[in-house]
Image: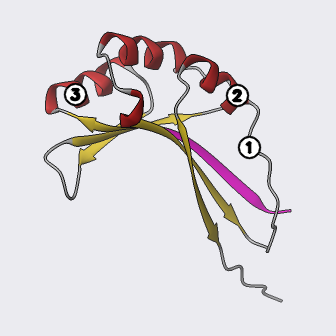
């Protein structure tokens, strides 16, 4: 199987000060202006070791982020037509700290065989 899974915690409705603070206080953060609203979307890349979960949780609590303003994006890229995939176990740990919505994105990558 050739499957790549990326897990990102997204804060979907930040003001500029919150976006900058998130960037400074949590590792693995990017943010951008929302294309349709006058706010910013912060994205925190998460990995199996969850190195930045404590800092993210502290930011989330301190900034009093509403639960509906965040989600966990699980982006799956597959080079084959796998119809079943398991969510990484560390996502369960994240949900124990911040129980928010899960959002899934699926992409089929095209591979070329060369001889």
Q: Vertical placement of 48 versus 35: above or below?
A: above
Q: Quadrant of residue 106?
A: bottom right
Instruction: Name the residue at 46% across, 16% down.
Output: 57
- The disc label shown at residue 33, or none: none
User: For this rendering, which residue is in front, 5 or 34?
Assistant: 34
> Is tag 1's residue or tag 3's residue first in the polypeptide sequence?
3
- For disc 3, the neighbor class at 10 Å (few under 14, some 14 to 19, many from 20) is some
Q: Nearer the viewer, mark 1 or mark 3?
A: 1
**Image quadrant for the N terminus?**
bottom right
Q: Is residue 51 magenta?
A: no
Find residue 24 and report its horizontal and vertical position in percent. Answer: 29, 21
- Of helix, strand and loop, which one carries label 1? loop
Question: Cβ–Cβ below 8 Å for labels 1 and 3?
Answer: no
Query: Which residue is disc 3 drawn over?
Result: 20
Q: Quadrant of residue 99?
A: top right
Q: Does the rendering let one see residue 10? A: no
Query: Which residue is disc 1 drawn over?
Result: 87
> Is tag 2's residue or tag 3's residue first in the polypeptide sequence?
3
> Is tag 1's residue or tag 2's residue first in the polypeptide sequence?
1
Question: Cβ–Cβ below 8 Å for labels 1 and 2?
Answer: yes
Find residue 107 and report its horizontal and vertical position in percent. Answer: 61, 68
- Of helix, strand and loop, which one carries label 2? helix
Query: Which residue is disc 2 drawn over?
Result: 92
Instruction: Name the residue at 80% across, 47% down.
Output: 86
- For disc 1, the neighbor class at 10 Å (few under 14, some 14 to 19, many from 20) is few
Q: Nearer the viewer, mark 2 or mark 3?
A: 2
Instruction: Report the predominant secondary structure element of the magenta stretch.
Output: strand
Find residue 110 and report its horizontal and vertical position in percent. Answer: 67, 80
Between the C-alphas of marks 1 and 3, the distance is: 30 Å
Between the C-alphas of marks 2 and 3, the distance is: 28 Å
Q: Which residues are magenta?
A: 1-10
């Amino acid at each position: 199987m050739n499957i790549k899974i990326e897990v990102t915690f997204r804060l979907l409705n930040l003001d500029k000060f919150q976006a900058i603070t998130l960037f400074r206080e949590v590792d693995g953060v990017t943010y951008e202006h929302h294309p349709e609203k006058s706010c910013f979307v912060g994205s925190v890349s998460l990995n199996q070791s969850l190195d930045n979960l404590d800092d993210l949780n502290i930011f989330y609590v301190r900034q009093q982020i509403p639960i509906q303003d965040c989600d966990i994006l699980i982006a799956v890229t597959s080079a084959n037509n796998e119809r079943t995939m398991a969510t990484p176990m560390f996502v369960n740990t994240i949900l124990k700290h911040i129980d928010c919505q899960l959002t899934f994105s699926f992409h089929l990558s095209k591979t070329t065989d060369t001889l």
